[in-house]
Image (cartoon, helix red, strand yellow):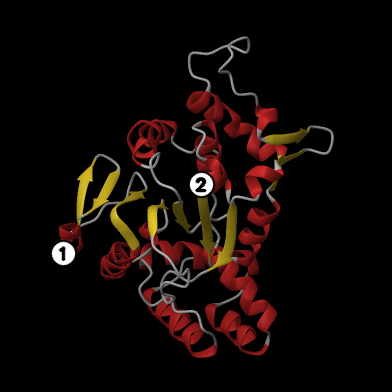
Amino acid sequence: MEVTKDEIVFFVKSVKEISNYDFTEYSEKSFGRRLEKIKGDLNQTVEQIIAKMRVNTEFLETIIREITVNTTELFRDPPLWHTINEEVLPRLTNKDEINIWHPGVSNGLEAYSLLIMLSEKGLLERVKSIGTDLNPEMLDIAVKGKYRYKVVSDYLANFDLVLNAGKNEKDSSFVPYSKYFDLDKIKGTIKMKSFIQSKVEFMRHDLVQDRNIFGHEFDLIICRNLLIYFTPNLQNRIFDFFHQILKPNGILILGAHESILGSAMQKYDKKGAIYNKR
């Protein structure tokens, strides 16, 4: 069910009036697609949806989750993980504590992917990792570290491409899945090992409105495929925020279809997919 620009404006304005959520500077195109899906699923007009949101807090939160839902996968985009392994992790090896932030962490698989790679480098004990998201359902999945096998099994090829390229199971350096997951094909689940789960803290954080609630700066921020949903103006404000909370020589990694443009670019040096704080 197609939505008009006026409907998007009405929805965003109404949500801001009745809640603490502010979608004012979300990309109209991306937001419109989400709203179209919600209208179609409910077979209701925007006015009907807003009317129900005004009187039903649970329904409001459900709609917000639908608007903000996002997914990620294990070792998404293997070439990028090779870049991280070769160009980013060596810069962290001499640090006593490695502080990492994953904004828009979704279901947590990206945060766990990095921890697995850090473990293989012998750096896990020094890591303090934080994953944040606006969507409480995604955060709940991330905290539990438990996923449907049918979903994650599609990503195990990425695991092998990143960690086992050119190896066979007889090689001493071969990394078996069982090192990091408990696989139960009967129940259809994959569960992260507790020693990996213990190295990341998941919490709610609104990247649009909340500031530095963490109490420290970061060596590495990985924020992939989130900023494409924001307007250029909002993106630049967030790039400024990232710059503020990155340590000197800190590293920012964005998604394949994201880049820093405008005045914010003066704060970073770009090398491929890696942005280094100036």
Q: Is residue 209 left or right of residue 187?
A: left
Task: Let me know if residue 73 appears in the view.
Answer: no
Instruction: Name which residue lies at 46% across and 51% down.
Output: 97
Residue plotted at (37% across, 59% down): 227
In the image, what residue type sits under mark 1?
Ser
Is residue 212 shown left or right of residue 201? left
Q: Callout 1: few (<14), some (14-19), or many (20+) C-alpha neighbours within 10 Å? A: few
Q: Amino acid at mark 2?
A: Arg
Instruction: Assign a secondary structure to mark 2.
Output: helix
How far across and down, in percent of the image, does residue 182 sit?
74, 36
The dot on residue 215 is none
Q: Earlier in the sequence, mark 2 or mark 1?
A: 2
Q: Is residue 29 above or below residue 268?
A: below
Task: Report whether 219 appears left or right of 34.
Answer: left
Q: Quadrant of the C terminus?
A: bottom left
Q: Residue at x 47, y 66 (%)?
A: 2
Q: Quadrant of residue 185?
A: top right
Which is nearer the eye, 178 or 4? 178
Which labelled disc corresponds to residue 263?
1
Identify the residue under disc 2: 126
- Judge whether 105 appears above or below 270 on screen: below
Secondary structure beneath label 1: helix
Q: Position of residue 260 (x, y in %)?
A: 24, 55
> Where is residue 148 drawn, in percent x and y?
71, 43
**Residue located 36% across and 31% down the image:** 86
Q: Quadrant of residue 273?
A: top left
